[in-house]
Image (cartoon, helix red, strand yellow):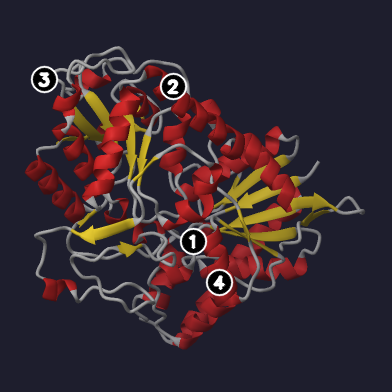
Amino acid sequence: MIKFALIHYRAAETDGVSLEMEKWQKAIENSGNKCIIIAGIGGDYNNFILDFRHRDIAAFTKNCFIKLTIPEKKLKENFEKLTKKCEKILRGFLEKEKPDILVINNVFSLPINIPFAAALYNLNKEMKNISFQGFHHDFFWERTYNPTNNFTAELVKKYYPPKTIPGHLVINSLAKGELKKRKDLKSSPVDNYFDFSQIDSSIPTGLKKKLNIKKNSIIFLHATRIVERKGIEFALDFINEFVRRKKDFENKILYNGKRINKNTETVIIFPGLIEDTAYYKKIKTHAKNLGVKTIFCEKLCEASKTNNSYSLWDFYKICDAVTYTSLLEGWGNQLIEALALKKPVIIFEYPVFTKDIKKFGFNLLSLGNKYYFKRGSRKLEEERLLQQPRTGRRLERGKSYKLPEQRLQQPQTGRRHLEHKELYELPQKIINKNVSRLYDILIDKKKYKKITEKNFNIAYKKLSLTALEKRISEIFIKSKSNKPQPLKIK
């Protein structure tokens, strides 16, 4: 039996890293091994000094990157004091549990608790019986961190990530290339996985009524948060064309037995958090101009169903199709959720999808990977101020652009995003083609079932917790001495 310890700033919360750790713990224990979680809060072992929200840690970080309000000598003293405190706490946890493998989630990725990283760096040199592994869901260069002093700059260079750690994991192959390029470190990509056991067969009674959706409506779901990089304007443009074409399919019977008629409404629902109010206002205006009916209902969606709310799975269950039109993602959790719930998916091919997910062979309605400036938006002269990263090319109306692979995500999740003041659009030809294809699927019960079942089976085979168990066993193997060792990364 191999004993794992997963470590992070926090656990049992709704951030992506915490959720992935829960899957890892379950997969590890399902395979007959043991797994504990160490964190600032929410783990099996906790001390809040490990959380970046700790008062002293937050003050230290503010001096490092926002404004230096104390002498640099005092900053160094605070660093040493906090590092020793973290080190003492971590040594106690590790000496008590004696894990074989310590998987360090994001602590060597983002400089938001540098003493925590320094403590692990020191313990790695001391505790040779534990295999320290860095798992990087983000990188500091994907955000804006401007050191206020030379000492901080040296710390970032040393610890993020350190070269002394024996193994490194990343969440996609683009991140693997970037880590090699920037730090000359080899790493192994690990996909995001899905716990299929969390889906039940219950019917979300009353949800459509609460949303004021008519019984005969065709429902689209956009399950992501409301932030700029999610490309929601693409989904709205798609639905606008879908509604325009409805008259061509009146009196047709849908896969669920309902008949399309002149009173059939089309609606798109958004249960995700509204985190970018400026973008939210843009897409609300855009939907109104198009005449697309939207329902934003974040307050009704909770992690688990309650008397006054519904789970995300309930929203998937009532929809007929899912739009997943992100320009940029670190992986693609909502895509896998839609496939697990057996829904047709309209997708924009963001870089990580093209690089790491497309190879699985899912049958999706692809909107391609090129975009344009929205016609009628800001003057060309203003648009010329916008540039693509690392290429120096300026974006101009009337020209299409393939998304650069280097831009992975937006600031809320730590990755760069494509900053723009207006909305984008897709070639109308590709929208028209996929609207026709979606109608063909929706009015053909056998085709609907065949496509969604195929996608479900691929997702279950490649991205379930069973697949995660296999991936973990590929990364970590036993040596002749029966001591777990990281797999040599090619």
Q: Position of residue 148 (x, y in %)?
A: 39, 82
Structural crowding at the residue carrying mark 3, measured as other residues with C-alpha within 10 Å and reported as few (<14), some (14–19) or many (≥20)? few
Of tags 3 and 4, which is closer to the observer? Answer: 3
Q: Which amino acid does label 4 sit on?
A: Tyr
The answer for how far apart the CA atoms under marks 3 and 2 are is 26 Å
Of tags 4 and 1, which is closer to the observer? Answer: 1
Element type where label 2 sits in the image: helix
Element type where label 1 sits in the image: loop
* Residue 161 location, quadrant: bottom right
Q: Mark 3 vs mark 2: which is more N-terminal?
A: 3
The residue that mark 1 highlights is: 138
Of tags 2 and 4, which is closer to the observer? Answer: 2
The residue that mark 4 highlights is: 160
Q: Mark 2 vs mark 4: which is more N-terminal?
A: 4
Give residue 159's mark: none
Q: Which amino acid does label 1 sit on?
A: Asp
Image quarter hosting the C terminus: bottom right
Q: Where is residue 11 in the image (x, y as percent from the top left)?
A: 52, 46
The answer for how far apart the CA atoms under marks 2 and 1 are is 37 Å
Of tags 2 and 1, which is closer to the observer? Answer: 2
